[in-house]
Image: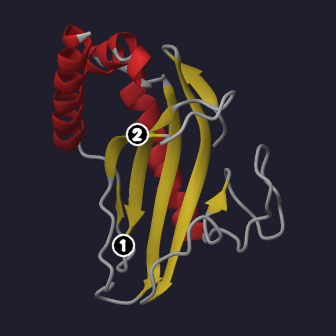
Amino acid sequence: MDSFEINGYVLAGAEYWPYIGKDDIDYPKDVLWGFYPEKGVIPPGETEANVDSARPEAIDCAQQSFTALQVFLAKNSPALRQIVELGADQGYVPRFYLWTNDYSRAAEPFPPGRREARLWYWKRKQPEPPKPPGYWKWEATLTQTGACTIPAPEQIEQYLADTLAEVKAKHAAN
């Protein structure tokens, strides 16, 4: 895995969220940044070293998710394209982040709840130029039983349809 560009969309980075026991993650300290993160390594663009190494099962799930993201972007979704084009002034950019949740060492059930695999968009609360105003998050989840789930086509289509409707409404109001 590494950064790439497909149809004008860029995979800018990756993040691993290792959940252990029953406590929620301490963000951003416990997040592992980068592709194949290793303990003590400071990924490019970050200021702190990773606190742990990604587990092989999490890397395998991230690889499955990475491949699925490439397939999705190669299809060049008309809804995604419209969101990025019409919503540029609303903070939508063609940049993605690969996110993998690892619950394989978490308690069952995990008291704070488990994040589901999904596509969504994260926006900064305050602009921080030259950083992008946001990223598309392609989020996969490795469950306590070791199952890897990636964003489902139905969730992706619904999220893009809802987001496009919001972008069009704001665009028309301006």
Pinpoint residue 171: horizontal percent, then vertical percent: 26, 12
Q: Can you tell which mark lies on residue 10?
A: none
Kindly report the distance in space between the C-alpha atoms of the residues bearing marks 1 and 2: 18 Å
Residue drawn at x 79%, y 61% is 48
Q: Name the residue under label 1.
A: 143
Amino acid carrying mark 2 in the image: Ala
Pinpoint residue 165: horizontal percent, then vertical percent: 16, 23
Circle 2 packing at 10 Å, graded few (<14), some (14-19), many (20+), is some
> Which quadrant of the figure contains the C terminus?
top left
Residue drawn at x 32%, y 21% is 80
Q: Mark 2 points at which residue?
A: 68
> Which quadrant of the figure contains the N terminus?
top right
Is 125 rendered above or below residue 142? above
Left or right, residue 61 beside residue 32: left
Amino acid carrying mark 1 in the image: Thr
Front-most of residues 113 and 10? 113
In which image quadrant can residue 32 be found? bottom right
